[in-house]
Amino acid sequence: MLRVLGKATSINVRKVLWACAEIGLDFEREDWGAGFKSTHTPEFLALNPNAMVPVIQDGDFTLWESNAIIRYLASAYGKPGLYPADPRKRANIDRWIDWQASDLNRSWSYAFLSLVRHSPAHQNAQALAEGCADWCRHMAILNQQLESTGGFVAGADFSLADIPIGLSVNRWFETPFEKPDFPAVVDYYERLGSRPGYRLYGRNGTP
């Protein structure tokens, strides 16, 4: 059985758990990370030298990096529609997965650390305002894309891209600051809420 190492509250671990739910793949999860077993032990570092969760073990195959993991699981076990083999369809999905991991992820960093984590090092008012503005700019890009597709991020149907993007949208709505009105994002959030996998793992690790 697939072994997943990482605490369920981690947004990156939840990518893997949600992907497993979409695929119908059984797994055993172990709590690793802050507040649980240390990722800096020799045992864990032998699996991932970055000391980060998640890590999976699928038989004798070990893999770290959450987006690589969900791509692997979808390729190895998923239905074709989740992560199609067609190069153009797959590239379209990959583009949004990578956009989330780079541009969107960076845009929310300061605001999230300031407003949710209450980090003392992230309480500069100007930097916070700039961070919120940058996050809003990126969410406007997502809203425009969702208006274009009328359904999900990469097209009319749910795909692997909606897992990291959907978790990002949850983080958007759960971070307390004044936000622009993005109707397509709101509709998308409601559509995700109808999926059992999202209900299990999409809302900060709690149903």
Image (cartoon, rainbow, N blue to C red):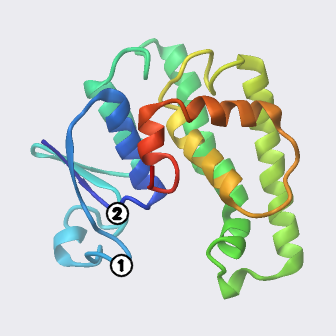
Residue at 32% of width from left, 23% of height from top? 78
Q: Secondary structure at mark 1?
A: loop
| Marks 2,1: beta carbons within 8 A | yes
Relative to 43, say whether 190 is above or below: above
Relative to 4, say whether 39 is above or below: below
Q: CA distance from mark 2 to mark 1?
A: 9 Å
The quadrant holding residue 124 is bottom right
- Numbered marks: total: 2
Q: Residue furthest top?
A: 86
Q: Secondary structure at mark 2?
A: loop
Residue 68 in sight here: no
Q: Residue furthest bottom?
A: 120
Judging by the rendered image, the residue that carries numbered circle 2 is: 7
Residue 163: percent from the left, percent from the top?
50, 38
In this orientation, which residue lies closer to the viewer: 50 or 191? 191
Residue 160 in sight here: yes
Judging by the rendered image, the residue that carries numbered circle 1 is: 35
Three-letter amino acid code at the position of disc 2: Lys
Residue 181: percent from the left, percent from the top?
87, 42
Query: Which quadrant of the figure contains the N terminus?
Result: top left
- Please give the label number shown on residue 191: none
Three-letter amino acid code at the position of disc 1: Gly
Residue at 53% of width from left, 16% of height from top? 89
Residue at 77% of width from left, 54% of height from top? 135
Residue at 18% of width from left, 76% of height from top? 42
Q: Residues within 10 Å of mark 2 (few under 14, many from 20)?
A: many
Residue 37: percent from the left, percent from the top?
25, 75
Residue 36: percent from the left, percent from the top?
30, 75
